[in-house]
Amino acid sequence: MDIAVAKRRSSFSGKFFAAAVLITICFVMFKQSLNSSSHNMFSYHEAGVTHVLVTGGAGYIGSHAALRLLKDSYRVTILDNLSRGNIGAVRVLQKLFPEPGRLQFIYADLGDAKAVNKIFSENAFDAVMHFAAVAYVGESTLEPLRYYHNITSNTLLVLEAMAAHNVKTLIYSSTCATYGEPEKMPITEETTQVPINPYGKAKKMAEDIILDFSKNSDMGVMILRYFNVIGSDPEGKLGEAPRPELREQGRISGACFDAARGIIPGLKVRGTDYETADGTCVRDYIDVTDLVDAHVKALAHAQPGKVGIYNVGTGKGSSVKEFVEACKKATGVDIKVEYLSRRPGDYAKVYSDPSKVRKELNWTAHYTLQESLQIAWRWQKSHLNGYGLSNAMG
Ligand SMILES: NC(=O)c1ccc[n+]([C@@H]2O[C@H](COP(=O)([O-])OP(=O)(O)OC[C@H]3O[C@@H](n4cnc5c(N)ncnc54)[C@H](O)[C@@H]3O)[C@@H](O)[C@H]2O)c1
């Protein structure tokens, strides 16, 4: 090969290399500009767009709320430490709403005041729906400090961050467990709150902190006290998938479905001698889709400087026996039921009077117990491993 040809070849490969480097740099810059512009969309207020921080949005109720908010064109930031929820639920939402500025996920712990403050300073939230919490009555009696920390003290941190960064609206997830065991049914918002376990007490304390703060603040606050939440997204995008280790703590719907799937041999119903029509406990089961509808209505009705407190339930009590029959019908499985003596601490009847929420927020429950269970069972059947992903990030 003569020297001139070799020189031409090396100058050609040099140019080729330079062009490749240039194209790569341009591509990286383009990607970064896309990322930063979509990131920026969360960091400034935009006229006509309401940006909602959904804490606990990887969890059961929070993910359903995020889905509804996104469908209704809200901008959503999910903050979750994935201690309980499912990254799989967040991935479903990210796939459904991939456009820039619609949904972002922040992996963070609400107990970390510095991190929370940084998140509030980097994002322009208009409202917060505060779902994040540990939420099992039995567990709360074994680990009370964890409950007071996770529920009460984290709510204080959220409130401080909201006040410091001028976020105007809070929708707070509370519970009928704050009422304890009232003598008179149905439970109205005026029923005295005498919680009887650390879970209910921690939520009541969080409510008290919010109420005291509200007295001298122009924040609009809505406190929603949910009854027993069941069901899942009727389009089958999301469902309820607690970690296997939480099944023990579990809720009756999860136990019914596990029994129908043969994961557990059958159902154990504790207590058949309560003063109820069939002797088993009576509860008010509210569908998750109805519940998130109440949140969206609460958000729309929140007014600066005002506090609204609402029971969110159907107003109708169903006994454990009725629940089991509905579950058998929904699953088509003749679930084996074992009747045992009472469990200490369970109360006979709990159901809501939802007339205030109906009147003031124009909200009412639509799904029947049977419909809710049928919808939830469809998701359970098609997601035998829940969201089928570990919570490992990345
Ligand atoms: N499920 C019910 O029947 C019911 C009834 C009444 C009230 N509530 C309330 O509704 C809310 C949501 O309950 P759920 O059933 O969806 O529970 P869930 O466990 O499915 O969801 C809670 C989410 O909060 C997250 N979380 C917990 N601690 C956190 C922290 N320190 N930082 C960041 N994220 C954290 C978890 O990882 C999880 O994703 C809770 O506040 C609960 O008390 C639930």
Image (cartoon, rainbow, N blue to C red):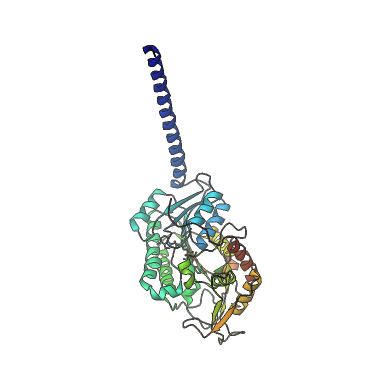
Q: Residue at x 63, y 69 (%)?
A: 331
Q: Nearer the viewer, residue 53 or 389?
A: 389
Task: Tell me: residue 355, above or below residue 82.
Answer: below
Q: Residue 140: where, in percent of width, then height?
A: 41, 73
Q: Residue at x 40, y 57 (%)?
A: 162
Task: Tell me: residue 60, above or below residue 46.
Answer: below
Q: Residue at x 57, y 87 (%)?
A: 275
Q: Nearer the viewer, residue 174 or 355?
A: 174
Q: Residue 51: where, in percent of width, then height?
A: 49, 51
Task: Tell me: residue 35, above or below residue 162.
Answer: above
Q: Nearer the viewer, residue 359 or 254?
A: 254
Total numbered labels placed on residues in the image: 0
Task: Tell me: residue 8, above or below residue 364.
Answer: above
Q: Residue 193: where, in percent of width, then height?
A: 46, 77
| Residue 363 visible from this viewpoint | no
Q: Nearer the viewer, residue 37 or 346?
A: 346
Within the image, what quadrant is residue 339 found in? bottom right
The N terminus: image quadrant = top left
Q: Residue furthest left?
A: 114
Q: Residue at x 44, y 37 (%)?
A: 33
| Residue 346 visible from this viewpoint | yes
Q: Residue 175: where, in percent of width, then height?
A: 49, 71
Is 296 placed left or right of 198 in the picture?
right
Within the image, what quadrant is residue 141 found in? bottom left
